[in-house]
């Protein structure tokens, strides 16, 4: 019998602790950047933003469901990010800082391409300016991402 073992992207990056380090590194880089710091300058920033972001990324990358079990769901995340108009320059800057943050925390090289693809996809899909918060349906699941990109959800 042949058993094929596959690791999730979550496992390959090193789990929650690695994603938490990445979240902190990315946030530090954003806060030091005149353009990228703007979204973080508004009142209402959650005091555990980096921890919540790491939990969200963990779930999206095939790890535990701590984010949706106790912090929010995809609907709340998307509603938080839509309706702010086009900001392509900000998106590109945040994507570049994410790549730099991956190097800062020395993520395994084989995970950096898939993570960069995920971050670009999630940034561009969540920042769609044609939607308003009211357009986002309730109960959206967190999209799953793997080494080959967006994973198809199997309906039961």
Image (spheres, grey):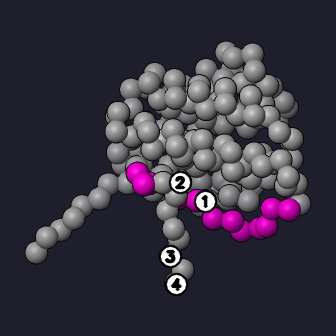
**Which of the two discs, 2 and 3, labels the residue nearer the N terminus?**
2
Left or right side of 140 for 108: left
**Label 2 residue SS:** helix
**Dot 2 corresponds to which residue?**
60
Who comes first in sequence, dot 1 or dot 2?
A: 2
Q: Please, is residue 6 above or below residue 26 in the view?
A: below
Dot 4 falls on a residue whose secondary structure is loop
Tag 1 residue: 142
Q: Residue at x 78, y 31 (%)?
A: 39
Instruction: State the CA–CA distance, disc 2 to disc 3.
Output: 15 Å
Main SS, magenta region, reads: loop
Q: Residue at x 24, y 61 (%)?
A: 5
Vertical placement of 73 versus 80: above or below?
A: below
Stretch of the chain drawn in magenta? 135-148
Q: In screen coordinates, is 9 left or right of 50?
A: left
Work out how far the residue at label 1 is from the one at label 2, CA to CA, in angstroms.
Answer: 6 Å
**Element type at marker 1?**
loop
Local secondary structure at mark 3? loop
Label 4 to label 1, Cα distance in Å? Answer: 17 Å
Mark 3: few/some/many CA within 10 Å (<14, 14-19, 20+): few
Q: Are marks 1 and 2 in contact (CB under 8 Å)?
A: yes
Query: Which residue is at 75% across, 21% downward?
Result: 35
Q: Tags 4 and 1 in contact by the CB under 8 Å rule?
A: no
Q: Position of residue 32 (x, y in %)?
A: 67, 15
Q: Position of residue 83 (x, y in %)?
A: 86, 47
Marked residue nearer the N-terminal end (4 or 1): 1
Is residue 142 within the magenta segment?
A: yes
Q: Please name the residue that numbered disc 3 is placed on.
A: 154
State whether residue 34 appears in this view: yes
Query: Residues at badges 4 and 3 in contact (C-beta under 8 Å)?
Result: yes
Residue behind mark 4 = 156
Circles 2 and 3, Cβ within 8 Å, touching? The answer is no
């Amino acid at each position: 019998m042949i058993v094929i073992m596959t690791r999730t992207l979550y496992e390959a990056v090193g789990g929650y602790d690695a994603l938490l380090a990445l979240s902190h590194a990315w946030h530090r880089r954003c806060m030091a950047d005149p353009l990228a710091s703007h979204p973080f300058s508004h009142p209402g920033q959650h005091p555990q933003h980096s921890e919540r972001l790491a939990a969200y990324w963990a779930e999206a990358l095939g790890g535990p469901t701590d984010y949706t079990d106790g912090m929010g769901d995809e609907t709340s995340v998307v509603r938080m990010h839509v309706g702010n108009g086009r900001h392509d320059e900000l998106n590109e800057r945040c994507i570049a800082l994410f790549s730099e943050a991956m190097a800062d925390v020395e993520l395994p090289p084989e995970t950096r391409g898939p993570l960069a693809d995920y971050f670009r996809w999630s940034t561009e899909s969540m920042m769609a300016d044609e939607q308003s918060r009211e357009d986002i349906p309730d109960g959206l699941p967190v999209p799953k991402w793997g080494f080959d990109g967006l994973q198809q959800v199997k309906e039961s």
